[in-house]
Every structure is written in structure tokens, then in C-alpha cells.
Image (spheres, grey):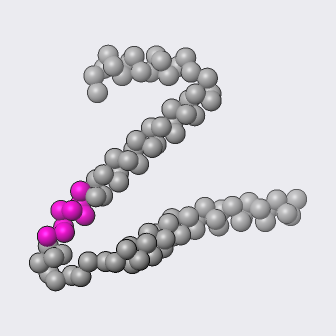
Amino acid sequence: MNATVEQGLISKIRTLSPQQLAEVEDFVEFLAGKAAKRAALGRLLAIAPALEAAGVEPMTEEEIAAEVKAARAERRAPLAREQASKESGADRS
């Protein structure tokens, strides 16, 4: 990033309210997530010919949905444990 552009963005960010800063942060996280998904798709497409050559059967939509559900549950598990821990700690007070 150009230093002048970076300084301009920083100057503008410094004038924002806390609510607006939260929105900017959310948007930046959205953009980062979008880039990560695009990179993951690129990696997947890069290995697709090798999978086909190896005779690996394509997954069904149901199998894909099950894999996505399992990955999301695994990713959310630490948050659920943390939340449960907080709630049980609040019950003790």
C-alpha cells in the first residue's frame, strides 16, 4: 500500500466514532474472510485434476453439507465451551 494512501486512511479512521470504528473493523474482517475463501477455492481447484487422475469420486452435495456442518461445529466448540464456562461462573456468584 502506498504510504500516502495509508496515512490518508489512518487520518480518516481517527475521526470516526466508536460505532463507526466497529463497522470498519467488521468490514475489514469480512474482506479478509472473503480473501481467505477465495484462496481456499484456488487451492481446491489446483488439486482437482490430481484428485480426478487418482480416481477420487466427487463428493455429493449431501456429503459436502455434512463436512461443512462438522467443520463449523468444530470451529464453534471452543466458543460454546467458553460461553458455558462464563455462564457457570456467573451462576456461582
Residue at 26%, 77% in the rendered image: 58
Residue at 18%, 67% in the rendered image: 47
Percent of width and height locating residue 70: 48, 73
Q: Quadrant of the C terminus?
A: bottom right
Q: Is residue 67 visible?
A: no
Q: Quadrant of the N terminus?
A: top left
Percent of width and height locating residue 4: 32, 16
Residue at 85%, 63% in the rendered image: 91
Q: Main secondary structure of the magenta part?
A: helix
Q: Is residue 85 visible?
A: yes
Residue 24 vs residue 83, the one in the foreground: 24
- Is residue 67 placed above or below 5 in the rendered structure? below
Percent of width and height locating residue 26: 52, 39
Pick out the residue farthest to the front.
61
- Is residue 89 placed above or below 60 in the rendered structure? above
Query: Which span is picked out in magenta?
Result: 42-49
- Is residue 14 placed above or below 39 in the rendered structure? above
User: Is residue 41 rendered magenta in the image?
Assistant: no
Pick out the residue farthest to the left.
53
Residue at 58%, 68% in the rendered image: 77
Tally the numbered discs.
0
* Residue 46 found in image quarter: bottom left
Percent of width and height locating residue 50: 14, 73
23 relative to 37 in the view: left or right: right
